[in-house]
Image: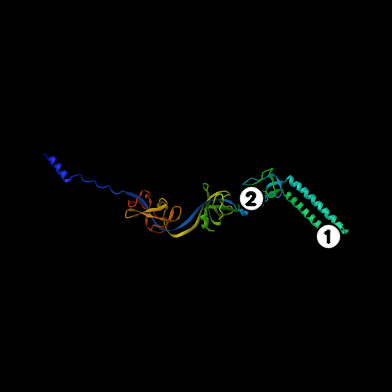
Amino acid sequence: MSRWLSIAMICAIAGCSKPAPAPPPDPTATVRTAPAIIAAIGETLTAYGAAEFDPAAMEALTSPFEAQVSAVHVAVGQAVRAGDPIVSLAPSPTTRLELDRLARESGQAARDHERLRRLRADGLASDAEVEAARSAASTAAAASRSLQARAAGGVLRAKRAAVVDTLSASPGALLAAGAPVAALGATSRLNARLGLEVEDAQRLRVGAPVVLEGMHEGGARLNARIASVDRRVDAGTRLAAALVDLPAAGPFLPGETLRAEISLGVQPDAIVIPRRAVLYEGERPFTFVVLGGKAVRRDLQLGVEQSDRVQVVNGLRSGDRVVVDGGASLAAGMAVTEAKATPAAGGRP
């Protein structure tokens, strides 16, 4: 038997084998953390709406008689001063006939009254007949004078400085008595109307602080307060509304689209973490905390949410270091190395 064959047989009998390779090291993730802190956090509500004329300060112009529009002197959106002409009206054919009829009836009633007075002097008419004729003559004369006065005021003018909000008439149009002609809004009396979900309208209180911002590029910002809450639900939008009084000569124009941040209150001593530390499994929020060089998962109950911060009602203690960068690639128990920590944004640990 050769020497090599003998060695092979001995190794086979003794179970000789190569040394097992060393197991690979556990994966280590590099993360960035921030501390959970105690801080005041405000609950805000985002709403959208538009600036509008205050309905209580709107001036509605209506046709005082059945008329035909002879001229329109303004355009929608035009600024007008007190006394400026808006629309000129002329009596319609029907109104002219009515003027003639009332004038004839007034004249006839006056003549009847005078005749009965003479008859009463001769004892041929009673006091009651004379009084009835006098009353009829007075009524007929008043009706004639009223229509004449309304028809004479054929130019509708602005009562105060305003902006033309709507125009319901065009030259040549025939208008019934009382028909709308134009609506003028006072620029010194503007509201912001903000749409609200019904449940949010129930929580909102009058006087709550609100920051308004124009939606266009470089839009103005304004600090204001909620003036009233309209809890009626609009049939089209299915939203309630909050109203904000806007200052005279303010930064917003009627019809301008606005974004609002409404303050609903402040939690003074909340446990707060950066919003980006919160992960979700379905709808369940959680985060990773670094303990002893390992990633530990903590399920969270969240409270007030602000732009970049969120309140933790349950699941963390003040001072816990939560993973703010790199958490999406972690698993519970994974070894981690902390990069330079993210400082706390205000508050106390």
Query: In terms of sequence position, does the residue under pointer 1 or pointer 2 come before the other?
Result: 1
Q: Can residue 115 be seen in this view?
A: yes
| 98 to the left or right of 338 | right
| 176 to the left or right of 197 | right
Label 2 CA crowd tier, 10 Å (few <14, some 14–19, many 20+)? many
Nearest the camera: 228 or 129?
129
Nearest the camera: 39 or 132?
132
Nearest the camera: 118 or 330?
118
Q: Residue at x 65, y 48 (%)?
A: 182
Tell me the SS state at disc 2. Answer: strand
Rendering coords of residue 248 (x, y %)? 59, 54
| 94 to the left or right of 202 | right
Q: Which residue is drawn at 82% across and 58% down?
A: 129
> Which amino acid is tagged 1?
Asp
| 286 to the left or right of 24 | right
Q: Which mark is residue 184?
A: 2
Q: List the residue tagged with mark 1.
A: 127
Q: Which residue is drawn at 12% across and 40% down?
A: 3
Label 1 CA crowd tier, 10 Å (few <14, some 14–19, many 20+)? few
Rendering coords of residue 245 (x, y %)? 57, 55
